[in-house]
Image (tube, rainbow, N blue to C red):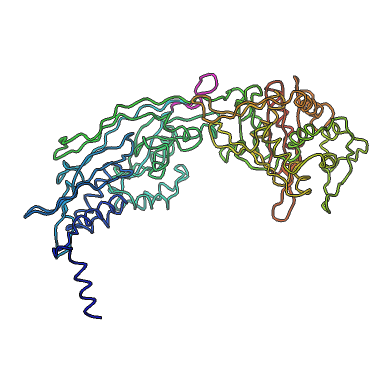
Amino acid sequence: MALSVVVAVALTGCSDDGKAKDTGQQAAQDFLAAWQAKDIAKAAGLTDSPDQAKTVLTAAQTQLDLRQGEYAPGAYTKADGDKPATLEYNAKLTVQGIPNPIEFKSSVPVVKVNGKSVVHWQSTIVHPQYTDGAKFKNSRDVPDRAPILDRNGQKLAGPTPAVAISVWPAKMGGDAEAIYAALADPVFDKDIPKLRDAVAKANPDNAVPVVTLRQDVFEAKARAKLAPFGAAIIIKDIVLQTSDKAKQLVGTVGEATSEILQKKGYENAGAGDQVGVSGLQARYQAELAGIATSKVTIQGAGDAQIAVLAEIQGKPGTPVKTSLDQRVQALAEKVMAENNGGKNAAIVAIDTKTGQILGAANNPANGANTAFTGQYAPGSTFKTVTSAALLQAGLKTTDKAPCDNTLVVNGQTFKNYDGLEPIPNADFRTDFAESCNTGFISQRDRLQNDSLTKTANDLFGIGQPWDVGTSTFDGSVPPAESANELAASMIGQGRVAASPLVMASVAATIESGTFNQPTLVTEPAPPGKLASKPLDPNIAAQLKALMQNVVQNGTASMLKGVGGDVGAKTGTAEFAENGEVLTNGWMIAFKNDVAVAVFVEKGKSGGSAAGPIVQAFLSAV
């Protein structure tokens, strides 16, 4: 056994011709692989000068603001006398803020140390002209950020004087705790533990962004708090894009952080740039920001330029145009603020002829964009879609459909909303006007389990992917798996889910007779917009008449006095919370060529909770 082990070791150390195996190529390749994986400690450990290698590799990566380095091995040359073995490699560097990769060739020398092949460290491994004491410099001149416009080309987000505040870790010293205490003031709205972590991980000589404040706020509430800390606080005057209208849609701009810069769309941005943080400002970061005029160089002693690695002529940002109407947007925000009853709520208004979004607002105004991304059972507002499916199946609005107190489906009892008295001789038109659940469910045998799915998808685009220019929830109407689930789906319960935007689109489709996918951004037009699709004219006319009758003779009678051609549908959707059954209030409506949807979380009913908001909006639109 001992002999076989000795032989095995001997065999692994020799080549076929009896000469020692050259392990230099593998050593160099391992170094490049670790370097490419950003494991600098491992790469440095494969050299004959680990500490120096780690220092230089780390500095080079920081100086470049390197997103990713690719180092492809090339030709290998064996050692020859005093000349070390070398492995050539092709570098392809993706540098933050530089649109195109920087490419060059260099080489990795390899020597033997105590019989082991290791990389012979020298700075020129990083780049042939990156000699000892050299450094990379990435100079950038950022263009002004382009504006976000309304449908008439007027600015929604415009320039505002502001101050970008950063800390300089190397200068914080003994004042660090006092600085953190000052920045804990609410005016800075900063997560201090997170800031501590960012400072700990940062290069001591790299600024760490803290917050951006409007200049008037900074002067009034912040300057004095930071004055004692001198050079440890970096204050930079900037021009910030802010919006007074449609803030949740337009979004915000702030100083780029390392986390933001790793996201798709931020490749052309650099540390310290003002970048989109949310909303359209984030979605269209690349278009709005443009490209900075940049120059990447290697500099030697006294900042003398040794080499130019990249030089980019910048381009100004491109404005983003939206479909928003500033008058309608202001009205949506006003009626939402004045009529929400202290509850979470949302409103969306759409041009029925085009699908273009005219305005949207939420309560709270600084919370989630429920108007576009909320996912809720739409309740009886979904009876518009159910009615379309029933009409397709041959139902006539004059067909008898008694409105009983309750209706049992396979042992499950469905009931109407509190206060609705039985209507024994009701026809379907009356059931729609009074929002009678039992009258609707009594017609379930006309439908297949997937009928509502097909109608929602084919006629109203629900469940198809909409690219309106920002994040949305586009609805879900899965096929029913039982008669009970079909019954629930018919009245907008069960697994049916929609956003206010989806239900506003339903109202718009019924008013115009054509499904036009909602859009928020018109230039640049989002790709993949769904094609417009007209409804059967007979069905469209009947659906419109049903909604008009809800105003004249049904649950939306509060809209009678708003003027114009008005139709509506109320909705009250049940949901369970902590063992209690609660309700959300809905209403969808149209007036002439404007459609609107309102959602009120935990509203008692559609008429009482959403009705006043719709009434105030349509009265003034």
Q: Residue furthest left?
A: 81
Residue at 71% x, 26% y: name it: 535
Q: Give coordinates of residue 554: x percent, y percent.
A: 83, 31
Q: Residue furthest front?
A: 17
Q: Is residue 604 visible?
A: no
**Residue 79 location, quadrant:** bottom left
Q: Give coordinates of residue 33: x percent, y percent.
A: 28, 52
Along the viewing direction, whichever of 181 and 21 lies nearer the viewer: 21
Q: How many marks?
A: 0
Along the viewing direction, whichever of 358 and 240 lies nearer the viewer: 358
Q: Is residue 119 magenta?
A: no
Along the viewing direction, whichever of 98 and 574 lies nearer the viewer: 98
Q: Which residues are magenta?
A: 148-159
Q: Give coordinates of residue 197: x percent, y percent.
A: 38, 52
For the C terminus, the quadrant is top right
Q: Is residue 413 visible?
A: yes
Q: Residue furthest right?
A: 425
> Is 438 left, or right, of 570 in this rendering?
right
Along the viewing direction, whichever of 200 and 573 lies nearer the viewer: 573
Q: Give coordinates of residue 98: x percent, y percent.
A: 32, 35
Q: Is residue 157 magenta?
A: yes
For the N terminus, the quadrant is bottom left
Residue at 36% x, 51% y: name it: 178
